[in-house]
Amino acid sequence: MNALQRTAAKVFGLTPHLKAEVFQPGPGPRARFSYVVANGRLQLYDWKVGTLIDEGYLKNSDLYSVVTFIIRKAMRAPFYLYQVRDEKSLRSYKTLTGEDATSESLKAAKLMRTKALEEVDGDHPIKNLLERPNPYQTGLSFREAAIGYELLSGKRFIRVNSGALEPQELYIYPSPLMEIKAGDNYGQIKGFRFTPWQEDFTPEQMIYSHNFRPSIEGYGAELEGLSPLEVLAFSLQEGNDAKKQSITQYQNGGPKGILTLDDKLMESLTEDQAAQIEYNIGSKVGGIHVSSVGLKWMNLGLSPKDLALQEARSFALRDFCNVYGLDHRLFGADATFNNRNEAKKAAIVDAVIPRLMSLRDDLNRAFEPFNRGGKRYFVDCDVTDFPEMQEDMDKMVDRLTKAWWLTPNQRLAAMQYEEDASNPLMNERWVPSGFTPMSEYGMQPGQNEVPENDGSY
């Protein structure tokens, strides 16, 4: 702070403007946060993920709505167990349903899945784990925690309890409480530690996935996932402060001010008379007070409208939606019906499906020990059950009708109907009738000559 700033602070009675950067122990290489103090008030949040979750997801209704929208939509997609038919087709299928999936690629993926995968019938240990991953969670609550922690912290930890070879139980560990131990080589993970009771795990015991995080603090930082809440820290504070300020002014009846008397009356007013006027007006707060004394009011603060508190919250909501891949019209009252429907469809493709595919890949990593004896299993989630995507069913039917090179059973599978195994003709390609090769459709040589009149015409 320069001399001019110090002089101004002294004249106006302000606390000097302080900046500090603090490093505290905690999960990750370094738990770092910055803050600014002005007039004795802490301006910025601690940037540790746990604090951001507490101040954001647990206290900010807009952020909570955005995150839970994705979680609840994702929980509606059922998971199934398949056996791999064709590896090449499976790679194409994963590409069509990957991070860059679109409505068109998902339509093509339905057809590719019938060629790449075959659903496993009957009982199987993997199916049991999908329904009951551990004694304390159902499959739905497990997926809710798996997707929720990834959305909030940018990383996911799946603890795999194995028997002699195959997984027996799966657990989701709270990512803000996990510490990553960097190995001797760049990018290597030596192990993990659950900090509440200092329990250590080897890399083989934990399925770990995370968002990309640039390394700017030294070796090991790149192993930590970047939480979206870190990117949203300023927007989160802006939205929370706007709501707090609005509540404060609402409780106080508006901005504070000073009530003064007319200058002429002030000269003749005794101390007792001033105290009586102050008591009378103070006792009438919320009601009407009639006074014969000339009074003047001077505001010491701005109104909620002048402070643009509602606009601040609106801007924060837009930031939340942008970071999580959603359209803000999903949560606004000004959106039309058609705009909201289009926003819902875009949300499934842009925000929900990528999270489901990420969880699908983590689960398949956990189930790799089951792949032996020439069999390879693949866990997949059905993203065609979303009502938002069913609006294109008529287009899909038209497309399948024209795709004559597919067998009837392949078309049934693409539309999520049960295949007909009793009729062998359902596994054959049906060629459309009524088509004529162009070489046979044209006039043959000599056919364009006028025949000689034989008396019949």
Image: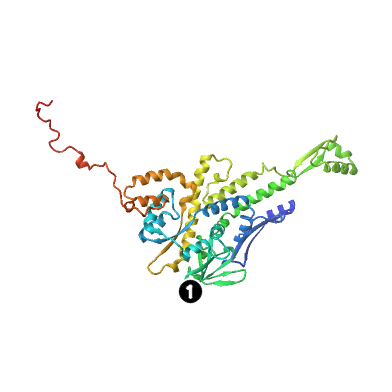
Q: From the top left corner, tell me how far across and down residue 405 is, in percent.
A: 31, 49
Residue at 9% over, 29% down: 452
Q: From the top left corner, tell me how far across and down residue 36 is, in percent.
A: 65, 57
Q: Determine whether, in the image, residue 296 is placed left or right of residue 276.
A: left
Residue bearing the label numbered 1 = 164
The reply to whether residue 412 is in sight is: yes
Q: Determine whether, in the image, residue 400 is placed left or right of residue 287.
A: left
Task: Name above or below for residue 322 compared with residue 158.
Answer: above
How many marks are shown on the rendered structure?
Answer: 1
- Secondary structure under badge 1? loop
- Crowding near pointer 1: few (<14 within 10 Å), some, many (20+)? few
In the picture, the quarter occupied by the N terminus is bottom right
Q: Determine whether, in the image, residue 143 is placed left or right of residue 281.
A: left
Q: From the top left corner, tell me how far across and down residue 365 is, in percent.
A: 46, 65
The reply to whether residue 219 is in sight is: no
Residue at 48% over, 62% down: 127
Amino acid type at circle 1 is Ala
* Display coloring: rainbow
Residue at 59% over, 47% down: 315
Camera-side residue of 5 and 367: 367
Residue positioned most to the front = 422
In the picture, the quarter occupied by the C terminus is top left
Q: From the top left corner, tell me how far across and down residue 281 is, in percent.
A: 83, 41
Task: Name above or below for residue 283 compared with residue 90.
Answer: above
